[in-house]
Image (cartoon, grey):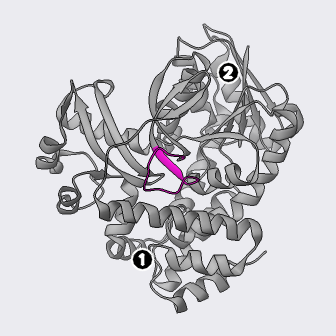
Amino acid sequence: MKKLTVLGGSSIASPTLIQEMLSRKDRPPFEVCLVGRTKPKLEKVAAVCTALAENAQIPLKITFETDLQRGLSGTDYILNQIRVGGYKARAYDERFPKQFGILGEETFGPGGMNNAKRTIPIVLEYCKAIEEYAPNALVLNLTNPNSFIQYAVVRYSNVNIIGVCDSPVGIGEGIAEMLGIPYQDLWIQYVGMHHFGWVTKALHKGVDMMPAILEKLGQIPGLPVDAEIARAVGGIPTSYFKYYYHSNRVFETQSKQEKVRAEQLLDLENQILEDYASQSGELPASLKQRGAHWYGASVVPVMLAHVNNANQVFILNVVNGTTIPWMPADAIIETPALVTGHGCVPLQPAEMPVDLQAMVRLNATFEMLWVEAVVEQNYDKALRAMMLNHLVHDLDQAKVILEEIWIF
């Protein structure tokens, strides 16, 4: 029996993970150990997960722990989905940048930087425990801001980690829907970083469909940016590029909202927990409003590809090395990678226009510098990183933002 330990296992979305594992007929027997700090919440979530797994055709054992050592001991895989500070801390990340005329978001801009500052030290503490109790485990990181976290783990620990995200899959599924073909029949070429990249090719039976796609951009569900800029660069960006290309529009929209996204999710979380307490054996309708596309699109398929030595390709966050020659060797890139039982092998991505290369290099430099500033508590590096943030306009603005968040 394989073991998966879920850090942040008390998340209301965890039952969706169990549902996805139950749907897979190609998995071996598994123990899923949910590790959380808040026992009452953990018990509610674990009860739902246990009820779901009771009639599993392939054994699926649910356990839960508040003790990290017991949760990690003997594990093969670790899913990191912790949210340091919960939705209240996320709400702050989404609110405070507005006082400086900047949109608020948990992974992008100063809000994402503060999220990383709060989360990195906790993740590195977990890494010490992983090194002691589960040194051979593969960590799948889902915690945002993903590439900040992964770079910190790679630079400051010996933990084996890859980053998983469903954003590139979502773009591919939108393209497939527009073309009227199954998503699995497409080869999606993604180049960039977590929440900062583009689909530059979409091959179907050896034919690049991107020219035809660019002509019909208006038909792609939920295109995050104006079609004009997507056509100009010859690719489709992640949804997070609305914060880059249309920051003025997003800021205006956010300024009119009474509640930030985190506050809406907190209300929904309370409702879901109430529903968990009154139901068993099935997922409540309220959970569907939250959504957890990442488990079925990335987390479970990648883990099982590793378990089964399946030699399948997924878009993952990995250390660059020599994969993209115009990126720093130790940068975290998001790229197609071959998943085997021995590890993940990044594949050489397509070329990008030089302006997009410059944007991605800048993003990598900014993220790496901020991680180092946080771990070293180095104000000079923090100021340099803040000046590289895509939404920060000048030194005066960078300094007042740091006055707000640079507290240890």
Report the disc number at residue 139.
Answer: none
Residue type beneath disc 2:
Ala
Residue at 39%, 75% (x, y): give it.
251
Assign a secondary structure to mark 1. helix
Assign a secondary structure to mark 2. helix
Residue type beneath disc 1:
Ser
326 horizontally vs 73: left or right: left
The answer to which image quadrant residue 386 occupies is bottom right
Residue at 74%, 52% (x, y): give it.
123
Picture quarter with the N terminus: top right
Report the disc number at residue 51.
Answer: 2
- Is 326 inside the magenta-drawn segment? yes
- Label 2 or label 1, whichever lies nearer to me, is 1
Q: Position of residue 180 (x, y in %)?
A: 19, 29
**287, 250: nearer the viewer:** 250
187 horizontally vs 13: left or right: left
Picture quarter with the C terminus: bottom right
Q: Residue furthest bottom?
A: 396
| Circle count | 2
Report the disc number at residue 255.
Answer: 1
Residue at 39%, 38% (x, y): give it.
169
Q: Can you see residue 96? A: no
Q: Position of residue 258 (x, y in %)?
A: 47, 71
Which segment is the magenta one? Answer: 321-334
**269, 302: nearer the viewer:** 302
Q: Position of residue 75 (x, y in %)?
A: 77, 27
254 horizontally vs 57: left or right: left
